[in-house]
Amino acid sequence: MSLWKSFKLNVIMQFALSSLAASVSLAEVALLDRVVAIVDDNIVLQSELEQRTANIYHQIKQSGTEPPEAEVVKKQVLERLILERLQLNIGDKAGVRIADQEIDQTIARIAASKNISVEEYIAQISASGETITRIRQEIENEMIIMQVQQGSVMRGIQISEQELNNFLNSEEGKLVSSPDVLISQILLSAPSTATVNELENIKTKLSKITQQLSEGADFKQLAIANSDDQSALEGGDLGWRKLAQLPILFSEAIEKLEPGQVSDPIRSGAGFHLLKLYERKGGGEQLIEQHFARHILLTPNQIRDEQQTVELLEKIRTQIIDGEDFASLAKQHSKDPGSALKGGNLGWSTPGLFVPEFEQTMDSIALNEISAPFQSQFGWHILQVTERRMQDFSEDILRNRADNLLRQRKYSEELQVWQQKIRDEAFIEIKEI
């Protein structure tokens, strides 16, 4: 054999051996990840389940609640991932898309809630071993799921004038200015298709849980281990709720509780519930501060970029401060068709009427002060508040609040039933985990 042939053979053999080693390595890597659930035309991977379980387990421990066995948490996490997949599938088929700008704004709000800059928040994410790409994907998924839930459930909710009148004329209608309550729940799901034996098993499990609670067991730990609600991994925490926003079955039970107490079992269309009341606050007469404001809105266009828009708004602001008429300048310059012809006048407002940037400025400036230019999703504004007053709820405000509360109540009731329905109708195959 020639030296050249010997060299070629060695190279080929080395290449073959390295390829074989790479194949074995890839096979080993592939074995590290596998499908743990098939959800219609989607899947849940082992790696995703493990990562989410580890994150949730860490959060539970950080909250001061003693977590159950990791396998119990993993089962809850898998159920959450399956439900997420189902809702994301619906969103994908409906063409729901979230713009990058919306995700950026959400990240900015998260950073602001932590009193840090966006850059500092991203640095925190990197330091924890996470990636901003994965965080953005989580935020996008949550926003898609929220839109799907709103579109699928809230869209079908109608409140008639008769329902509204009946509500306002009832004792329950007095709860419009009801207290806020901090509550948690344990839900044992009982679908309408459940057999007699299945219902008996659920009731046996419920009896065991109530016995454990009476013996001093931790409610949050039992929720994590047993609840079928999406709040299970947060210890059943439902957060602060207006008592009147809760399903009437819940509000009637909670009214009888003192902080720290747990309700008797409650039967609903979704199953059996146990509620724990942690705190109660508020209630009674509520006065709200109203503002009488006017503004001028400018937007960039083909002949004026953003910087030039702000400079023009600064010039208009200076003119007003120097004595020129706000209303005349608003009619001349403002791009808000709803208020420009009224001299920028927005009338009396109530909290929640305007976008957050607008309300924040309206709340912070002194009476008759002309604000510095600020930006909202509509463009750049200057704003003046000419009057403020404390006002009790008017009939219109009361009816709007009542309508919203009835919608929220129906939404809370229907969401659980809808989620159970899409799960029952889906093809789901859970592999051994």
Image: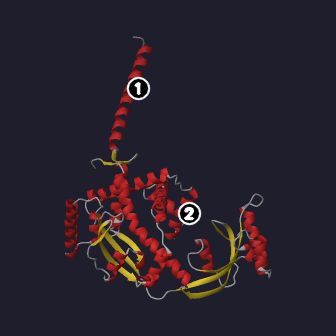
| Marks 1, 2: nearer the viewer | 2
Measuring from the top left, give residue 392's x and y in whole percent. Answer: 54, 88
Q: Give the side of residue 340 with respect to residue 267, left or right.
A: right
Percent of width and height locating residue 309: 74, 65
> Which numbered disc flags the more N-terminal residue, 1 or 2?
1
**Could you tell me which secondary element the residue under label 2 belongs to?**
helix
Q: Are marks 1 and 2 in contact (CB under 8 Å)?
A: no
Q: Amino acid at mark 2?
A: Gln
Seen at 45% across and 84% down, the residue is 169
**Residue type at numbered disc 1:** Phe
**177 versus 306 height, above or below:** below
Question: Depth check: 226 or 63 in front?
Answer: 226
Which residue lies most toward the front here?
162
Badge 1 marks a residue whose secondary structure is: helix
Q: Is residue 349 visible?
A: yes
Q: Quadrant of residue 83?
A: bottom left
Q: Crowdedness of circle 1 by 10 Å Cα count: few (<14), some, many (20+)?
A: few
Residue 68 is left or right of residue 301, and the answer is left
| Residue assigned mark 2 | 105
Residue 401 x %, y %: 50, 78
For residue 15, the mark is 1
